[in-house]
Amino acid sequence: MAIFHKVSESKYTMEGILRYITDQNGHDEKVISFSGFGLNLYYPVRDMLITKYLYSKTGGSDYKHFVLLMEHNPEMTVFLNAAERIAGAMYQLTGCQLVYAIHTNTDKIHMHMILNSVRYTDGSKLDINNQLYFTMITVCNKILLQYGLEMVRTGEKYIRDDYEIDSLGNPANVIA
């Protein structure tokens, strides 16, 4: 099974987190791929900050950080294609610019996604509530399934404590 994890608030600035996920030296030369949506990859920090300044939303958290980890390493090309589709879907779903990177520096292949905390579409702040979180997992699972990959597991060990799920792994406290 795969794990989809929202990383808690980070010690990094936006520039710091983007440098971290793309840093070959810090990841034993095992950043396999990085790309993004809604921004220029040569200037992702600039582009994300421009969005914040355009909408006067420079306070609070700068970004949202997610990791998709595959417990059983899939064939690389298949995962790269699925990861690109997942990142594109998250861009469309949230309306936020994002950068993602694929790492193989641990025994599990994983993808980091950094989303701007301000939507480029309307300037509102991105709030990862229960409904959006489970929608993100559902989108991941649909794409992973299309590529024949393991789906994201749910359960109290794998999702945040404030999300309640029923015995089938479905959100119990989400307003539809």
Image: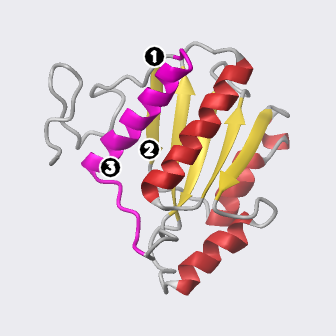
Residue type pointed to by label 2: Lys
Residue type pointed to by label 1: Met
Q: Secondary structure at mark 3?
A: helix
At 20% across and 35% down in the image, what residue appears?
171
Label 2, on which residue?
6
Nearest-to-viewer mark from 3 and 2: 3
The Cα atoms of the two marked residues, 3 and 2, are separated by: 12 Å
Label 1, on which residue?
1
Q: Is residue 12 magenta?
A: no
In the image, is residue 112 above or below residue 51? above
Give neighbour class at mark 3: few <14, some 14-19, many 20+ (Cα, 10 Å).
some
- Which label's residue is closer to the chain start, 1 or 2? 1
Q: Between 17 and 75, which is closer to the camera in this rendering?
A: 75
Residue type pointed to by label 3: Leu
At 31% across and 40% down in the image, what residue appears?
134
Q: Secondary structure at mark 1?
A: loop
Give neighbour class at mark 1: few <14, some 14-19, many 20+ (Cα, 10 Å).
few
Task: Tell me: 66 left or right of 34.
Answer: left
The Cα atoms of the two marked residues, 1 and 2, are separated by: 17 Å
| Magenta part of the chain | 124-149
Marks 1 & 3, CB-CB < 8 Å contact = no
Nearest-to-viewer mark from 1 and 2: 1
- Which label's residue is closer to the chain start, 1 or 3? 1
In the image, is residue 148 above or below residue 18? above
In this view of the protein, can residue 111 be seen by the observer?
A: no
Q: Secondary structure at mark 2?
A: strand
Quadrant of res 54: bottom right
Rendering coords of residue 107 (x, y %): 66, 18
